[in-house]
Image (tube, helix red, strand yellow):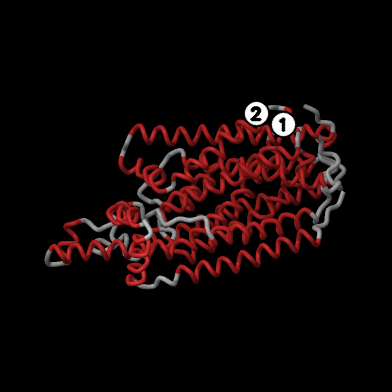
C-alpha cells in the first residue's frame, strides 16, 4: 500500500515552519533590545516596581563575584557594592541574550531525540526478531528519516550559540589568571573543548545515520527478494548498532545536555536521557500509526498492535520515573554541594515545569494507561500521547534552561515559535519519507505472524 503526503498536511507543515521562523526571528530581536547594563537597570527597576525584584535580588546574590575579588578591583565599600550590582546586571543581560538560543536548542533537541528514540526501538525489533512489530516498520523508518537533519540542526545551533549555551566555551575560562577562569572546567578541558565536541558529534551522527541508511536499504530490498538474505543483514547490523548506540547515546547526553551545567554530573544521566527519548519515540510511532490508520491506510494494523505500543508507552514511563527518582534520591540524600545544586536551582526557580513534568511523565501515563482496555482506544492513546510528549518537552526544557537563563524563563514566543519551526520540519521530513516506499514490508519473514498478531 502506497502513501503520499497530502497537500493539506504539507501546507500545514510549511505554515508551521514559516510562523516558527518569524517567531524565532522576533525572539532574537526582542532579546537584543537589551544591549547595555543601562537597559538592564531599567528592566530591573520596572520588575521591582511590579513585584519582580525579589527573585532578581536572590539571583544577584547567587551569581555575584566573591567579596575578595570585588574589593581588589575597587577601593572602598561603596565601590564594592557597585561592583556587586554591575556583576548582577551583566549576568541578567547575558541570560536575556541566552534565552532565544536556549529555546531553539530545546525544541531542536526534542524533535531530534524522538527520531533517535524510534531508531533505537526499530533496531531492537530487528535484533530481537520480534514477531508482532514488522507491520509498523515502515512507520518507524519514516520517523527515523529525521535523525540526520535533526542532528545537524542541533549541532548547528550549538556551533552558533557557543557560550550562550555552553559556559565552557566562554573566552579565557581555562586560562589561569583570566577573569573568566574556572578551575573545575579547566580540569575537564581535555574532553570539553570545541574541537572534540564537534568531532564526537560528527561520529555519533554519522554512525546513527549510516545504520538508518543501510537498514532502510535492506528493508526495501527485502520486498522484492526471493530469500531472507537482506533480513539477515538487517539483523546483524541492528545488533551491532545497538552496541554502538548505547555508548554514543550516553556520550551524546554528556556533551549535548549535561555539559550545559559543567560543574554538575550524574552517572545515571545517559540512561535518563535514553528513557526520555525512548518513550517519546514510541509515543510518536503510536500517534503516526493511528493517524495513518484513520486515513484508511495500514489496514493490516489491528487493535493489538496499538495495545502493545500503548503498553510500551506505559512501561517506559514507569522506567523513566524509576531513573528520575534514583537520580534525585541519591543526590538529595548524599547532599554533596556540587551535585545537589542541580536540583536546588530547578526546585527554587522552576517549580511549575519541574513538578509539572513529573506529573505529566509519571502520574498521567500511570492513570491513563494502566487499564488494558484503554490501550486499545485510539483517541485515548492519542490523548495520553499528547500529555507524554508535552511532559518530555518540559523535561528537555528543565535540562537546558536553568543552566542558561536561570530564573528568567518563560513559555513565550521564542519557545512556542521554536516548537512550530522544528515540529513543521519534523512533519515534513517524516511524512515525505513515508511516501517513498510501500507501507507494508512485504517479504519480512515475520510478516504473517505480525499481520495475525493478537493479544
Residue at image position (36%, 56%) is 51
Q: Which type of secondary structure does the marked residue at label 1 adopt?
A: helix
Neighbourhood count class around disc 1 (C-alpha, 10 Å): few under 14, some 14–19, many 20 upward: some
Neighbourhood count class around disc 2 (C-alpha, 10 Å): few under 14, some 14–19, many 20 upward: some
Residue at image position (71%, 27%) is 372
- Are dots 2 and 1 in contact, CB under 8 Å? yes
Residue at image position (37%, 61%) is 47
Q: Is residue 416 above or below residue 218?
A: below
Task: Describe residue 446's horizontal placement relative to residue 73 as left or right.
Answer: right
Q: Which mark is residue 370?
A: 2
Q: Is residue 164 visible?
A: yes
Residue 395, image x, y percentages: 52, 46
Q: Is residue 161 above or below residue 119?
A: below
Q: Is residue 241 visible?
A: no
Residue at image mark 1: 374
293 or 76: nearer the viewer: 76
Q: Is residue 324 above or below residue 55?
A: above
Residue 393, image x, y percentages: 56, 48
Alpha-carbon span between mark 2 and mark 1: 8 Å
Residue 350, image x, y percentages: 44, 47
The picture quadrant where one finds residue 46 is: bottom left
Residue 73, image x, y percentages: 17, 66
Q: Which type of secondary structure does the marked residue at label 2 adopt?
A: loop
Task: Describe residue 135's horizontal placement relative to residue 38 as left or right.
Answer: right
Amino acid at each position: 500500500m502506497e502513501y503520499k503526503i497530502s497537500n493539506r498536511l504539507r501546507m500545514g507543515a510549511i505554515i508551521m515552519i514559516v510562523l516558527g521562523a518569524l517567531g524565532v526571528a522576533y525572539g532574537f530581536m526582542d532579546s537584543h533590545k537589551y544591549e547595555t547594563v543601562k537597559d538592564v537597570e531599567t528592566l530591573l527597576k520596572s520588575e521591582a516596581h511590579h513585584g519582580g525584584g525579589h527573585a532578581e535580588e536572590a539571583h544577584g546574590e547567587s551569581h555575584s563575584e566573591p567579596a575578595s575579588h570585588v574589593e581588589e578591583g575597587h577601593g572602598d565599600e561603596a565601590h564594592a557594592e557597585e561592583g556587586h550590582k554591575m556583576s548582577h546586571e551583566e549576568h541578567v543581560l547575558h541570560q536575556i541574550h541566552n534565552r532565544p538560543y536556549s529555546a531553539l536548542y530545546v525544541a531542536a533537541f526534542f524533535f531530534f531525540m524522538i527520531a533517535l528514540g524510534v531508531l533505537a526501538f526499530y533496531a531492537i525489533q530487528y535484533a530481537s526478531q520480534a514477531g508482532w512489530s514488522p507491520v509498523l516498520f515502515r512507520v518507524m523508518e519514516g520517523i527515523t528519516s529525521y535523525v540526520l537533519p535533526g542532528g545537524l540542526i542541533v549541532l548547528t545551533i550549538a556551533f552558533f550559540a557557543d557560550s550562550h549555551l555552553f559556559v565552557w566555551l566562554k573566552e579565557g575560562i581555562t586560562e589561569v589568571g583570566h577573569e573568566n577562569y574556572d578551575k573545575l572546567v579547566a580540569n575537564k578541558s581535555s574532553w570539553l573543548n570545541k574541537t572534540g565536541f564537534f568531532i564526537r558529534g560528527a561520529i555519533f551522527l554519522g554512525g546513527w545515520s549510516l545504520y538508518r541508511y543501510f537498514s532502510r536499504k535492506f528493508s526495501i530490498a527485502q520486498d522484492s527478494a526471493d530469500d531472507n538474505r537482506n533480513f539477515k543483514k538487517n539483523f546483524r547490523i541492528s545488533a551491532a548498532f545497538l552496541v554502538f548506540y548505547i555508548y554514543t547515546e550516553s556520550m551524546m547526553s554528556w556533551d549535548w545536555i549535561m555539559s550545559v551545567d559543567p560543574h554538575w554530573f550524574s552517572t545515571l544521566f545517559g540512561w535518563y536521557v535514553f528513557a526520555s527519548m525512548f518513550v517519546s519515540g514510541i509515543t510518536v510511532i503510536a500517534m503516526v500509526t493511528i493517524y495513518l490508520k484513520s486515513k484508511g491506510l495500514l489496514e493490516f494494523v489491528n487493535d493489538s498492535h496499538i495495545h502493545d505500543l500503548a503498553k510500551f508507552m506505559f512501561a517506559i514511563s514507569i522506567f523513566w520515573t524509576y531513573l528520575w527518582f534514583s537520580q534525585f534520591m541519591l543526590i538529595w540524600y548524599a547532599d554533596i554541594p556540587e551535585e545537589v545544586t542541580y536540583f536546588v536551582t530547578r526546585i527554587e526557580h522552576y517549580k511549575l515545569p519541574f513538578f509539572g513534568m513529573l506529573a505529566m511523565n509519571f502520574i498521567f501515563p500511570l492513570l491513563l494507561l494502566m487499564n488494558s482496555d484503554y490501550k486499545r482506544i485510539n483517541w485515548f492513546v492519542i490523548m495520553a500521547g499528547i500529555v507524554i510528549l508535552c511532559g518530555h518537552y518540559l523535561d528537555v526544557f528543565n535540562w537546558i534552561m536553568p543552566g542558561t537563563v536561570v530564573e528568567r524563563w518563560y513559555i513565550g514566543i521564542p519557545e512556542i515559535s521554536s516548537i512550530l519551526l522544528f515540529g513543521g520540519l519534523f512533519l515534513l521530513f517524516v511524512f515525505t519519507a513515508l511516501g517513498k516506499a510501500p507501507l507494508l514490508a512485504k517479504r519480512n519473514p515475520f510478516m504473517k505472524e505480525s499481520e495475525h498478531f493478537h493479544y
